[in-house]
Amino acid sequence: MTRRKKTRKTGPLAARSQPKMERQREEGKRGKEPARTKGKPAGQRHTLDVKENSKAGKGHGTNSKAQEDPRKGSKRPVELVKPVRKTAEQVEDVTPANPQEALEFEFEALENDPVLQELLDQIDEGEQLSAEDQQFVDEQMTRYQELVELLGIEDNELDEDDA
């Protein structure tokens, strides 16, 4: 038996394929389908596509603010200098050596505490404070009363200072 070489011809039993001319005519009538693309087009991320800009209505400028790199990070400013923290020596310099002066210093600090003053103003206006804020106010006021007793300050003297 002699060997036969394989061919691409289908033979008499296969389905008939259309001739090339007929296929071209049908494709012309249907219209061409857009070719499928795989991935992004070649280029750099810094170059801008003119077609995208015209579709979006952003104008012809290539260096517009709206066209910045979307990967840009946070807008929060970065501190270039480390904040100065008080050392133990500096804190010791502020506190007086005399216990009586220390109590007066703490009393002044309590009277001039802006957070406490703001919370007391809210209480005077009739607003409800959160549990944490109310606890803070209660602690500060009890310490304030202790300092008033220790320093021997009367409520009348405090009222005269405010007037």
Image (tube, rainbow, N blue to C red):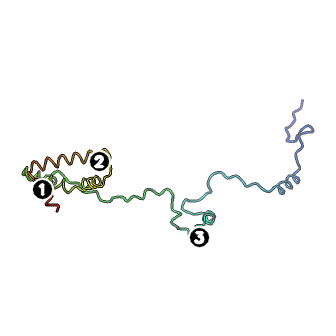
- Secondary structure of residue under mark 2: helix
Q: Amino acid under label 1? A: Asn
Mark sitting on residue 60 = 3
- Secondary structure of residue under mark 3: loop
Q: Amino acid under label 3? A: His
Q: Residues within 10 Å of mark 3 (few under 14, many from 20)?
A: few
Q: Earlier in the sequence, mark 3 or mark 2?
A: 3
Q: Position of residue 57 (x, y in %)?
A: 60, 66
Q: Residues within 10 Å of mark 1 (few under 14, many from 20)?
A: few
Q: CA distance from mark 2 to mark 1?
A: 28 Å
Identify the residue position indicated by label 2 in the image.
133
Query: Which picture quadrant has residue 139?
Result: top left
Comparing labels 2 and 1, the label whose residue is closer to the camera:
1
Q: CA distance from mark 1 to mark 3?
A: 75 Å
Return the residue found at the far bottom.
60
Q: Residue at x 32, y 60 (%)?
A: 80
Q: Position of residue 118 (x, y in %)?
A: 27, 55
> Nearest the camera: 40 or 43?
40
Q: CA distance from mark 3 to mark 2?
A: 56 Å
Mark sitting on residue 156 = 1
Comparing labels 1 and 3, the label whose residue is closer to the camera:
1
Q: Residue at x 32, y 52 (%)?
A: 127
Q: Residue at x 88, y 45 (%)?
A: 17
Comparing labels 3 and 2, the label whose residue is closer to the camera:
2
Q: Amino acid under label 2? A: Asp
Q: Position of residue 1 (x, y in %)?
A: 90, 29
Compared to residue 135, the image places residue 63 above or below, namely below
8 relative position to 64: left or right = right
Q: Earlier in the sequence, mark 1 or mark 3?
A: 3
> Nearest the camera: 145 or 86?
145
